[in-house]
Amino acid sequence: MNNQRDVTPSTKQNSERPLLQINRLVYVKVSTKILEATDKRLKQYLEFASAGMNSEITNDDVIEYALNHLFERDPAFKSWLRIKQ
């Protein structure tokens, strides 16, 4: 999934460091197939979310959020993860 790295120089004095702080996200590309009906619904949701948030929402945004929502809400998966670790 997304790994977040904090890019901030830490060895220099505060007065010598840039004020800029960048959080880099590491993405992986995934290829998958979905049903036509699901694609139609996804496009409708993108239109709805983009209008409601006054910002362009992409397939990637929705799928990232939906998968993380699933992972957080599935009690059997959470239990399985505890055992696996």
Image (cartoon, grey):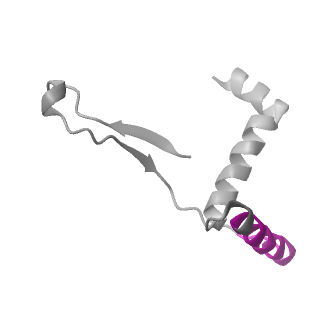
Q: Position of residue 8 (x, y in %)?
A: 28, 35
Q: Report the residue at 82% width, 76% height from top.
A: 40
**Residue shown at 12% from the left, 32% from the top:** 16
Q: How many marks?
A: 0
Foreground residue among 27 and 77: 27
Q: Could you tell whether 84 is left or right of 27 in the image?
A: right
Residue sitting at x 72%, y 68%: 51
Q: Nearer the viewer, residue 77 or 84?
A: 77
- In magenta stretch: residue 37: yes
Q: Is residue 42 left or right of residue 56?
A: right
Q: Quadrant of residue 21?
A: top left
How far across and how far down the image is residue 69, in percent?
74, 43
Q: Which of 64 and 16 is in front in this view?
A: 16
| Quadrant in the rendering for residue 13 | top left
Q: In this view, does 30 lie above or below 85?
A: below
Nearer the observer, 16 or 26: 16
Q: What's the magenta bit mostly, secondary-structure-wise?
A: helix
Please say if 56 is above or below 83. below
User: Is the residue 23 above or below the residue 36 in the image?
Assistant: above
Percent from the top left, x then y, of residue 53? 69, 60
Rendered view: 4 above or below 78: below
Residue shown at the point (76%, 29%) measured from the top left: 78
Quarter of the picture containing the C terminus is: top right
- What are the residue bounds of the magenta stretch? 33-50
